Image: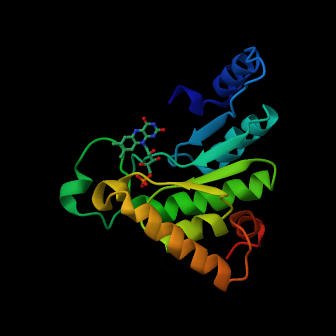
């Protein structure tokens, strides 16, 4: 939570930039919480761009509890992941894309359980996706299914690559 403070985030990024990695500097990717308002998203993204971050991952689990969530789950503590996170995290991804343009790699995360979900993240500006919760329910065979469906959707919309779809105007 401390790094939701842009000044402290900037300080951390400065310290990371001072590390001598030699020839093998790893890519630096920051992951955003979905529980920030638009003004703070703008400040955090500006801080990350100023530090020349390599990538931004959107988003982590949420402390919010959507109104349509089953009561039993609504009462649970901790970060919520999976389907209830999809819409908000995809909207946030699109907003971050607006702010960054093509300057950094964006990784779309939150509620992906199908090729259609992965495609929606890509059309919102992600060139890579990550999933966690759906893997728990469906196992690793889901990755193959997602890749097939994604390839089909890319082809049918006339895209030759994920990057081309991510760069196209949002839908
Ligand atoms: C059990 C569990 C543990 C997680 N641990 C981490 C973690 O250590 N670091 C992190 O950045 N995100 C962590 N996450 C968040 C996921 O990487 C992901 O951002 C989030 O679950 C949304 O994706 P999903 O809807 O596909 O699960 C965790 C999620 C779950 C469900």
Q: Image height check: is 152 above or below 115?
A: below
Closer-to-camera residue (20/73):
20
Q: In which quarter of the image is residue 124?
A: bottom right
Q: Image height check: is 22 above or below 32?
A: above
Res. 65 visible in picture: no
Q: Where is residue 112 in the image (x, y as percent from the top left)?
A: 46, 62
Res. 162 visible in picture: yes
Closer-to-camera residue (138/88):
138
Q: Which residue is drawn at 71% across and 70% down?
A: 165
Question: Looking at the figure, which quarter contains the C terminus?
Answer: bottom right
Residue with the most extreme bottom position = 156
In screen coordinates, is 64 left or right of 169? Answer: left
Please state the quadrant of the image where ligand 1 appears. top left
Q: Which residue is drawn at 73% across and 24% down?
A: 24
Colour mapping: rainbow
Q: In which quarter of the image is residue 121?
A: bottom right
Q: Image height check: is 56 above or below 149?
A: above
């Amino acid at each position: 939570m401390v790094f939701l403070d842009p000044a402290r985030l900037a300080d951390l990024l400065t310290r990371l930039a001072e590390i001598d990695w030699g020839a093998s500097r790893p890519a630096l990717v920051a992951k955003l919480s979905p529980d920030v308002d638009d003004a703070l998203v703008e400040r955090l993204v500006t801080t990350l761009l100023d530090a020349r971050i390599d990538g931004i991952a959107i988003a982590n689990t949420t402390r919010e509890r959507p109104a349509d969530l089953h009561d039993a789950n609504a009462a649970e503590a901790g970060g919520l992941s999976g389907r209830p996170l999809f819409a908000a995290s995809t909207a946030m991804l699109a907003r971050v894309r607006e702010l960054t343009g093509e300057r950094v790699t964006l990784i779309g995360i939150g509620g992906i359980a199908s090729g259609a979900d992965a495609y929606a993240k890509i059309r919102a500006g992600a060139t890579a996706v990550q999933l966690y919760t759906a893997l728990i329910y469906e196992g690793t065979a889901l990755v193959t299914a997602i890749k097939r469906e994604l390839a089909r959707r890319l082809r049918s919309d006339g895209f030759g690559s994920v990057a081309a779809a991510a760069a196209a105007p949002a839908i």
